[in-house]
């Protein structure tokens, strides 16, 4: 269980979040959606306890992955995933290997993260979060650099992770991924939560926020893998 | 890698003990104990402190161009020592030179941490270092301009070039423990530096106290590199070059670099100091030049090579 209530965040004189409340429990995959600048990443940071006056979290229980996470140095994929063991103060090989396997990056474990593709590096960073074996995952745009097949693979992994009893809160720009995989979608606009609904009920609010029409697309398109 | 470095040191230490100014022979007892042993120990300690400080600072500040000079610690140590020179304390009682240098480094570090703010971050620490460095070099120039006599001026200038020659054993006894203390502080930062490779927020989310880690890096550098600068003046580029030399062999994980950087720094400075002592045999020089001149001559092109590789 992780959550915040009545949170207002002011950064550099700007109010970024107004009176936001959000809670998520075990078994839930919650997607945060909304236009750029709506406050999604700030809300995720607040949940992670990284903003002033937000409750600090036990790093063994809560893993946070920042948007566009990258490493300053040319660490190997395995070394990056092993950083996820820092909260446990060990370098246990088994959880690291499991994390590399579920993220589909095991075959590149001794490659340097600055010499593989952006999508592969993204999976290495995700493996770092899985290596911690936390109860709560806070992930900012984990599918950003991934091709469609890889995006669906990661979203299925996150859904499975939630279904075995973890809490997953994920910022997503691709609303169709949120609609397909999330249990709940939280729509933000200008720092306020305007909807917190299951996918089959959220579409009107999302359409209003993005200013886009709702349609049932009859044209040929790529379907997610079954 | 550690094993190779230890073997390298096992070769370099006897050579250093046998090498005098343009001579290579077993010296008599007095020279051996009063000159060669302190000089060799200082080379190992100061080089090790500089190499380790460089590796920690590059990791902590996530900047491949960071080195102990960048934080202004060596500059303020030099200033402190020059002030001790200036008022002539050092001539009457040699340990004041070292005490002045240490005090200068300490005051520099206090300013550094004050400038960097309550919760220092990498960029704020670099900015504070540049400020401390600028103040130290301005005051140093002032001290030189007001030097009481030409003799003092020559002494100060020569000292600032950085050298290991003619330092008595008492200076090793004073600076050694401080350098070792700094080394212990710095060697404990490996886990935090590893986490910092993902950025300060990510490190914080992994449970690393980032501000405290940066503060300990600054304090450890003050001891490990500042005490060295107080004894031997400014010996540049060791801290910058050593981590870069090691990365292809040890890998880029900052924590893994630390012990190797301490050993390699000691080996590099010792090797440079041996070369300097033998220089009059190979070059038309009347005396051995200060080792700081050689490290700067070899280090500066290296800096350019690094900068050109990272800036496309």
Image (cartoon, rainbow, N blue to C red):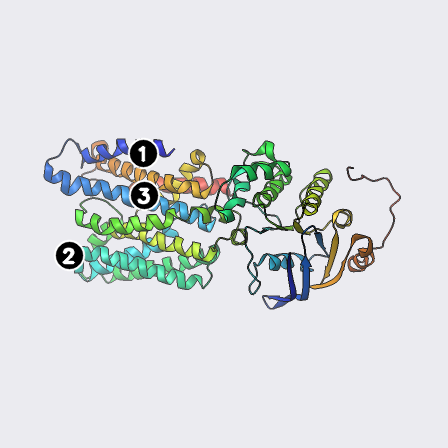
- The chain that hosts pointer 1 is B
Distance from the alpha carbon under mark 1 to that under mark 3: 12 Å
Which numbered dot is residue B91? 2
Location of residue B154 with respect to A131 vertically, above or below: below
Point 12% across, 39% down: residue: B31
Q: Dot 3, how many residues are within 10 Å of its Cα: few (below 14), some (14-19), or many (20+)?
A: many
- The chain that hosts pointer 2 is B
Point 59% across, 48% down: residue: A134
Mark nearer the N terminus (1 vs 3):
1
Location of residue A125 with respect to A34 vertically, above or below: above
Q: How many marks?
A: 3
Q: Dot 1, how many residues are within 10 Å of its Cα: few (below 14), some (14-19), or many (20+)?
A: some
The reply, left or right, for residue A73 in relation to residue B78 is: right
Location of residue A40 with respect to B195 vertically, above or below: below
SS for callout 2:
helix
Residue B138 in sight in this render: no
Query: Circle 3 is placed at which residue position?
Result: B48
Mark nearer the N terminus (3 vs 2):
3
Q: Position of residue B146 (x, y in %)?
A: 24, 63
SS for callout 1:
helix
Which numbered dot is residue B6? 1
Q: Quadrant of the N terminus of chain B?
A: top left
Residue A112 in sight in this render: yes
């Amino acid at each position: 269980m992780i959550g915040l209530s009545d949170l207002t965040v002011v950064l550099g004189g700007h109010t970024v979040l107004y009176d936001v409340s959000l809670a998520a429990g075990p078994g839930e995959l919650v997607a945060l959606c909304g236009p750029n600048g709506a406050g999604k990443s700030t809300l995720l940071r607040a949940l992670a306890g990284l903003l002033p006056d937000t409750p600090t979290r036990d790093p063994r229980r809560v893993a946070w992955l920042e948007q566009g996470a990258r490493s300053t140095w040319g660490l190997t994929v395995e070394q990056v995933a092993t950083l996820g063991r820092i909260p446990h103060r060990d370098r246990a090989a088994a959880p690291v290997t499991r994390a590399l396997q579920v993220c589909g990056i095991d075959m590149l474990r001794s490659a340097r993260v600055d010499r593989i593709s952006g999508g592969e590096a993204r999976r290495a960073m995700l493996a770092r979060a899985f290596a911690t074996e936390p109860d709560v995952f806070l992930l900012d745009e984990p599918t950003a650099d991934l091709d469609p097949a890889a995006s669906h693979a990661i979203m299925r992994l996150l859904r499975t992770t939630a279904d075995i009893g973890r809490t997953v809160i994920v910022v997503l720009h691709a609303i169709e991924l949120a609609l397909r995989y999330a249990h709940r979608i939280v729509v933000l606009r200008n720092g306020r939560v305007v909807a917190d609904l299951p996918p089959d009920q959220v579409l009107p609010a999302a359409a209003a926020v993005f200013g886009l029409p709702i349609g049932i697309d009859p044209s040929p398109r790529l379907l997610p893998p079954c | 890698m550690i094993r190779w470095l230890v073997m390298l040191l096992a070769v370099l230490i006897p050579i250093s003990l046998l090498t005098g100014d343009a001579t290579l022979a077993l010296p008599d007892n007095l020279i051996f104990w009063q000159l060669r042993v302190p000089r060799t120990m200082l080379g190992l300690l100061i080089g090790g402190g500089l190499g380790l400080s460089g590796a920690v600072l590059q990791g902590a500040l996530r900047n491949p161009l960071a080195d102990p000079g960048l934080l202004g610690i060596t500059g303020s140590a030099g200033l402190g020592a020059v002030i001790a020179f200036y008022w002539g304390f050092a001539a009457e009682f040699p340990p004041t030179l070292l005490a002045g240098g240490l005090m200068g480094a300490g005051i520099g570090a206090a300013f550094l941490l004050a400038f960097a703010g309550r919760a220092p971050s990498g960029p704020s620490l670099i900015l504070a270092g540049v400020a401390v460095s600028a103040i130290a070099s301005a005051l140093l120039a002032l001290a030189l301009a007001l030097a009481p006599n030409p003799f003092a001026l020559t002494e100060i200038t020569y000292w600032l070039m950085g050298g290991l020659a003619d330092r008595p054993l008492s200076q090793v006894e004073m600076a050694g423990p401080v350098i070792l203390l700094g080394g212990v502080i710095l060697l404990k930062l490996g886990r935090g530096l590893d986490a910092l490779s993902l950025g300060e927020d990510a490190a914080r989310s992994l449970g690393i106290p980032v501000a405290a880690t940066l503060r300990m890096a600054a304090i450890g550098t003050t001891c490990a590199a500042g005490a060295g600068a107080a004894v031997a003046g400014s010996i540049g580029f060791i801290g910058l070059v050593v981590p870069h030399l090691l990365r292809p062999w040890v890998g880029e994980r900052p924590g893994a670099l630390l012990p190797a950087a301490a050993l390699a720094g000691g080996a590099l400075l010792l090797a440079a100091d041996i070369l300097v002592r033998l220089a009059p045999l190979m070059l038309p020089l009347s005396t051995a030049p200060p080792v700081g001149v050689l490290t700067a001559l070899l280090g500066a092109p290296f800096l350019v090579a690094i900068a050109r590789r990272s800036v496309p």
